[in-house]
Image (cartoon, rainbow, N blue to C red):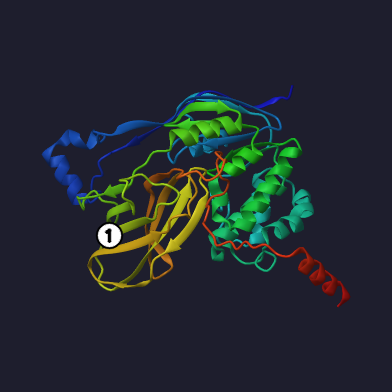
Amino acid sequence: MSTVVIHSEGLGKSYHRGALQQSTLLRDHLSRMLKSPLSVFRRPKDETFWALEDVSLEVREGEVLGLIGRNGAGKTTLLKILSRITKPTTGWAEIHGRVGSLLEVGTGFHPELTGRENTFLSGAILGMGKSEIDRKFDEIVAFAELEQFIDTPVKHYSSGMYVRLAFAVAAHLEPEILFVDEVLAVGDAAFQKKCLGKMGSVSRQGRTIVFVSHNMTALQRLCTRVVWLNGGKVTDAGDPRKVIDHYLQRNAVANLESVWEDNLTAPGNERVRLRSVRVIPQTDFGELITVHTPLRIEFTYFNYVPEMMLNVSMFLNNLEEVCVFNVASDFAPRPAGLIRHTLEIPGDFLNAGSYYVNMLIVKDASTGILFRDNVVAFEVVEGEVVGNWYGRVPGAVRPKLNWRSEAIDAGDLEVSTARGQST
């Protein structure tokens, strides 16, 4: 039996929230002291919440452990405790082996140093000697695809360039235990595929990986075991397919509209503020949505800056956390006041399953100024069944495309083939 390399018992991490912010101006401080001399010694009221609570784990050498859960479930907090970045409030954890962590884009990089210098710096932090880094350097740069920019200060890198170099360093300098958070979502599809392939290679070498991701397909392919965190606690653990199916079924909740009547509590800022997002089935059967049902998705928001150049970008995701598609509205100056954008999704396009919408309001076609995750959700069910197939049709979408079928004369086919061979 393989050796246990990560062992935790009763891990918990609490934080304070809701503390009242008081002015730090001297006149305000003196005013409070004169009104109530003892108030300066009192801490503002706050509330304790547990980001992680009573988590016990054993991870064995060579295992690939996946952590799943909604945003705020405690996944990153757990990785930060295991990486010795954050101290637990309760419990303890033992790590046996050299650790490499990739928890945030560019963690450990100095913005004024070049990619080359940061590679050596990160390697030294991971406990590597200069000769070992020298031996791996060309391979790291090639993997990150940064040959032309390796001597450029990383403050000029895009987020994708940051994460490519950070992952390349962490994966190639051979840590015995590798912690990877959802930073791979920053890279493009080709690089994500390369990273997943590299993690598969690392695991086959007998090294241990703890992997946080919303990509359920990658988790099922890579992981030997999955732990589902919910509200800071372990809800389920075990076989990846069973745990992921349980997680997806639990989170399949329809919410066809989100409306904020009160501008004070609506998501937004001094530039824009959401009013509503609605999924409107174009059917006579109420809210039932089948694979044949056309949909209209409507976004409304208040624009507070006259003639600001705005558009809405929508991301439709399935419950496997795969983006089915991303589309954007027209880009134009918007008047001050209530703005509405409407998107039409035709029938016979989406597959049966559960979907949710993320949205982004973009300024100047380049700067996101408001992001809202899981703003609406809906379920698509099967329509009438054709033929004898009752299983689930594979694929993220199932468009109805035009086929042409015809009978052809076998003699004509033989003549055509013969002519093709003689030319």
- Location of residue 403 in the rendering, given as x and y in whole percent from the top left corner: 58, 61
Relative to 135, 287 lies left or right: left
Q: What secondary structure is found at the residue carrying circle 1? A: strand
Residue 254 vertical placement versus 328 (above, below): above
Q: How dense is the environment of label 1, judged by Cα within 10 Å: few (below 14), some, or many (20 and up)? A: many
- Location of residue 53 in the rendering, given as x and y in whole percent from the top left corner: 44, 26
Relative to 206, 84 lies left or right: left
Relative to 186, 199 lies left or right: right
Residue nearer the viewer, 386 or 9: 386
The number of discs equals 1
Relative to 258, 196 lies left or right: right
Q: Residue at x 44, y 41 (%)?
A: 71
Q: Residue at x 22, y 37 (%)?
A: 40
Residue ranking furthest to the right: 422
Q: Residue at x 43, y 67 (%)?
A: 366
The N terminus sits in image quarter: top right
Q: Is residue 417 visible?
A: yes
Residue 287 vertical placement versus 154 (above, below): above
- Location of residue 218 in the rendering, given as x and y in whole percent from the top left corner: 61, 43
Residue nearer the viewer, 351 or 167: 351
User: The residue under label 1 is which amino acid type?
Assistant: Tyr
Q: Residue 251 falls in which quadrant of the image?
A: top left
Residue 310 vertical placement versus 9 (above, below): below
Residue ranking furthest to the bottom: 423
- Location of residue 172 in the rendering, given as x and y in whole percent from the top left corner: 72, 48
Q: Is residue 180 visible?
A: no
Residue nearer the viewer, 159 or 200: 200
Residue nearer the viewer, 212 or 167: 212
Pointer 1 residue = 301
